[in-house]
Amino acid sequence: MNVDHDNQLTGAVIGAAIAVHRQLGPGVEETAYETALSARLTAEGIAHQCQVPLPLIYKGILLDCGFRLDVIVEKRLPLELKAVEVILPIHDAQLLTYMRLGGHPLGLLLNFEVAVLKDGVRRKVQTTSAASSQGVDTVPAGFDELSREILSGAIEVHRHLGPGLLRSAYEECLCHELGQRKIPFTRQHLTPLVCDGRPLGQFSEVSLLVGNSVPVQCLSVAELSALHEARLLARIRQGNWAYGLLLNFNAPTLVRGIRRLTR
């Protein structure tokens, strides 16, 4: 890490972003800021790429979960562009995770939905790996054998990836862990919707059904809510299953993000 060069580079990028914000102001689409910032960087001779695919390598296996860096400058400085009224912890966590996946020690979060851009700039430095920052995580007592296997795999995923990624990445890696444990599962399981005993000709979907008996909903949210629980409970009743599992991978430790729901 060349501190002087990185300081000069981040300063140049922030200056370009400020110039874009002065002309466009807040209130336009994120893609417009990306296009304008890219043009400004090009005009200033700063090498960069937009919408760069970022693969996730999980235990030596390459997974394409649709991750994309908004902008990567000089192949070393990732930029996460936002146009939101409030920056949430998940936005910070996403950038830090992308930095870790790409091996980038420095990153910038630029939120253009502000009156003055300096209020929307966050400079992030990766000092520790996400895996080492997690607390001790073990399967809680009181779960049946299948649930314990599911949770053991989920905890392994969380230890490896840390919080902050997209839900689809966690589900993909969890499926890998279930496969390693030879536990059968189905993706996008459909259940016919019935109301007052009458088929509606439509279906509800469970993103992951394990062992043909346990619906699992993987999430990556700030915190689990009553709405999240109500959604899974509805799927449990419609599928006539005994219980289901909510797993919030954005929790600091996965144990804090586990909910077992019964009908």
Image (cartoon, rainbow, N blue to C red):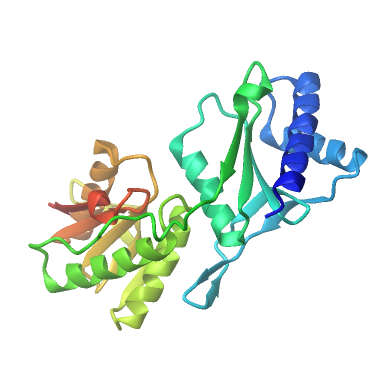
Looking at the image, which residue sits at the far top? 115
Looking at the image, which residue sits at the far left? 142
Q: Is residue 40 left or right of residue 56?
A: right
Q: Is residue 162 left or right of residue 262?
A: right
- 186 up-or-down from 127: above or below: below
- 45 up-or-down from 25: above or below: below
Q: In which quarter of the image is residue 121?
A: top right
- 168 up-or-down from 41: above or below: below
Q: Is residue 12 left or right of residue 51?
A: right
- 240 up-or-down from 200: above or below: below
Q: Residue at x 34, y 64 (%)?
A: 208
Q: Which residue is drawn at 27% across and 38% down?
A: 225
Near-viewer residue (205 or 245):
245
Near-viewer residue (240 or 45):
45
Residue 141 pos. (x, y %): 9, 62
Near-viewer residue (219 or 157):
157
Q: Can you see residue 189?
A: no
Q: In which quarter of the image is the N terminus?
A: bottom right
Q: Can you see residue 212?
A: yes
Q: How many marks?
A: 0
Residue 119 pos. (x, y %): 61, 22
Residue 103 pos. (x, y %): 61, 61
Residue 253 pos. (x, y %): 29, 53
Q: Which residue is drawn at 25% across and 69% down?
A: 152
Q: Quadrant of residue 31?
A: top right
